[in-house]
């Protein structure tokens, strides 16, 4: 059985608090990705999201 140091221990109450900033970064990344897709569609006339 491997020994664990105290620094590896993550209290269960800290995990939800740590997830809030991580989810915020993920949401902003997705929004930026979608904005970039719209720009590429308009500049290069390459329909990806605007397919009908």
Image: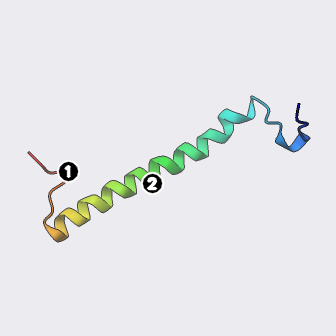
The residue depicted at 83 percent of the width and 36 percent of the height is 9
Separation of marks 2 and 1 at Cα, in angstroms: 17 Å
Q: Where is residue 50 in the image (x, y as percent from the top left)?
A: 14, 51
- As drawn, the label of residue 29 is 2
User: SS for tag 1?
Assistant: loop
Dot label at residue 10: none
Q: Which residue lies furthest to the bottom in this view?
A: 43
Find residue 8 and report its image quarter. Answer: top right
**Quadrant in the picture for residue 5:** top right
- Which residue is the site of mark 1? 49
Name the spot of residue 40 as percent of width and height, x first.
24, 65
Q: How crowded is mark 1: few (under 14 residues within 10 Å), some or many (20 or more)?
A: few
Which image quarter holds the C terminus?
top left
Q: Name which residue lies at 53% across and 51% down.
A: 25
Left or right: 21 with respect to 4? left
Q: Do the residues labelled 2 and 1 touch (CB within 8 Å)?
A: no
């Amino acid at each position: 059985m491997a020994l664990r140091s105290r620094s590896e221990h993550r209290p269960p109450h800290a995990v939800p608090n740590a997830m809030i900033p991580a989810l915020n970064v993920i949401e902003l990344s997705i929004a930026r990705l979608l904005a970039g897709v719209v720009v590429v569609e308009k500049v290069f006339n390459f329909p990806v999201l605007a397919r009908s």
